[in-house]
């Protein structure tokens, strides 16, 4: 955990002190009740200022309720320890034509170029329209925070990545502490210029997140593209129609990739390139698991390119360990398709438990590279 916080006093403890007659000493420490702060948009370019004014007037613990539709011509800075809530499709925040924002909504530490991480941000029931046809380079939701939640958010037409989690700030300032323990769930991302969900982390600080129960389609690169997947749990996603990889997980270390449904990846089809339904590049020593995933190619493959349903694509150092069990991979019966591929890369060795996997209609059912040991487990 990056830093500690003082826990609120339990009610029983407070009652005991009241009996002892020292309540007066505690008055300053009892937090005020959280307030609801409304931000009502007019669908004009004044809306970003309206929302920001409501946020600025709020206090830690408050809920900012945004009423749309809203038109954004400036980045809205999300202050720490607050909930930002809309009414689903009724609260659509659309980027104004030609605004070309780096981000529509962003954590305060990202906006302010801090070296420390934001915290306690909840974003719920908002629809973000990046207006890709009239803007470039924009990420609708930029997160640089720990212990935070994103729930029931829709992202459409992002000029860049749909949701980005970044250890770097707006001007590239690096963090000096970790960025962990957050959840992204029940999101719908469609029509991005970049990845659906992207992690940018040259510092190895963005670990131990959960990405779950979401739908990603029509993206410009990969569905999920993680520079760092250490401690991440990626599960129950439906990813379809992506030009590169469906799930691209680097630095797999205690990583779980479970129960995802993937269809039609690698539509880019560049000659000499390999496209993965699930790609995991392992760190050494600590195991990761890939289980219960369904990877399918249902359409016609591009005329060039190679395709791997599930691949352990190297180990960064030492010996890598992984369990690949109970998955199903179905291809289109071409020689350029491989069901399961295990390679140690530059690492010392790779040890894989591979069992109970269904592989059908591919040219090669399983490819095992030099220095890889495959067992059925115990």
Image: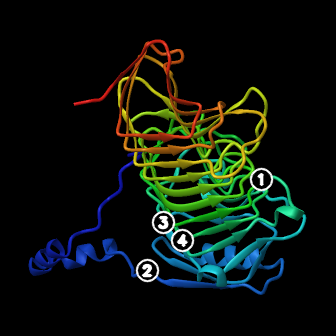
Q: Residue at x 73, y 84 (%)?
A: 41
The residue lying toward the viewer, choosing from 229 and 57, is 229
**Residues at marks 3 and 4, CA–CA distance in whole angstroms:** 19 Å
Q: Earlier in the sequence, mark 1 or mark 3?
A: 3
Asked whether the beta carbons under mark 1 and mark 2 sit within 8 Å of each other, the answer is no
Mark 4 = which residue? 152
Mark 1 = which residue? 193
Number of other residues with Cα within 10 Å of mark 4, as a class: few under 14, some 14 to 19, many 20 or more:
many
Mark 3 = which residue? 81
**Residues at marks 1 and 3, CA–CA distance in whole angstroms:** 31 Å
Asked whether the beta carbons under mark 2 and mark 4 sit within 8 Å of each other, the answer is no
Mark 2 = which residue? 34
Q: Earlier in the sequence, mark 1 or mark 2?
A: 2
Quadrant occupied by the C terminus: top left
Q: Residue at x 59, y 83 (%)?
A: 87
**Residues at marks 2 and 3, CA–CA distance in whole angstroms:** 11 Å
Q: Residue at x 37, y 44 (%)?
A: 326
Q: Earlier in the sequence, mark 3 or mark 4?
A: 3
Question: Where residue 190 sits in the image (x, y, percent)?
Answer: 69, 62
């Amino acid at each position: 955990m990056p830093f500690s916080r003082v826990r609120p006093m339990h009610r029983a403890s407070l009652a005991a002190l009241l009996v002892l007659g020292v309540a007066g000493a505690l008055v300053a420490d009892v937090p005020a009740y959280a307030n609801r702060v409304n931000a009502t948009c007019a669908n004009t370019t004044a809306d970003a200022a309206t929302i920001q004014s409501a946020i600025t007037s709020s206090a830690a613990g408050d809920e900012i309720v945004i009423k749309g539709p809203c038109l954004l011509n400036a980045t809205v800075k999300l202050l720490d320890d607050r909930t930002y809530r809309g009414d689903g499709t009724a609260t659509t925040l659309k980027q104004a034509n030609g605004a070309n924002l780096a981000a529509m909504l962003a954590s305060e530490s990202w906006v302010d170029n801090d070296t420390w991480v934001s915290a306690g941000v909840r974003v719920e029931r908002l629809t973000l329209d990046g207006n890709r046809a009239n803007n470039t380079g924009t990420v609708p939701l930029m997160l640089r925070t720990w212990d935070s939640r994103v729930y029931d958010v829709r992202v459409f037409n992002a000029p860049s990545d749909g949701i980005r989690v970044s250890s770097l700030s707006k001007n590239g300032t690096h963090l000096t502490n970790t960025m962990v323990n957050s959840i992204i769930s029940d999101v719908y991302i469609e029509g991005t210029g970049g990845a659906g969900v992207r992690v940018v982390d040259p510092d190895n600080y963005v670990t131990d997140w959960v990405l779950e129960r979401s739908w990603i389609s029509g993206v410009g690169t990969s569905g999920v593209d993680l520079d760092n997947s250490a401690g991440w749990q990626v599960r129950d996603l439906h990813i379809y129609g992506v030009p590169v990889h469906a799930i691209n997980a680097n630095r797999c270390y205690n990583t779980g990739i479970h129960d995802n449904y993937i269809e039609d990846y690698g539509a880019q089809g560049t000659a000499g390139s390999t496209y993965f339904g699930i790609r995991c590049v392992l760190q050494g020593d600590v195991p990761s698991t890939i289980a219960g995933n369904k990877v399918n190619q249902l359409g016609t493959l591009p005329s060039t390119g190679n395709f791997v349903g599930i691949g352990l694509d190297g180990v960064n150092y030492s010996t890598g360990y992984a369990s690949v069990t109970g998955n199903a991979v179905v291809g289109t019966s071409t020689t350029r398709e491989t069901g399961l591929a295990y390679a140690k890369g530059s690492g010392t060795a790779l040890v894989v438990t591979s069992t109970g996997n269904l592989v059908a209609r591919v040219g090669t059912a399983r490819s095992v590279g030099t220095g890889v040991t495959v067992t059925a487990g115990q």
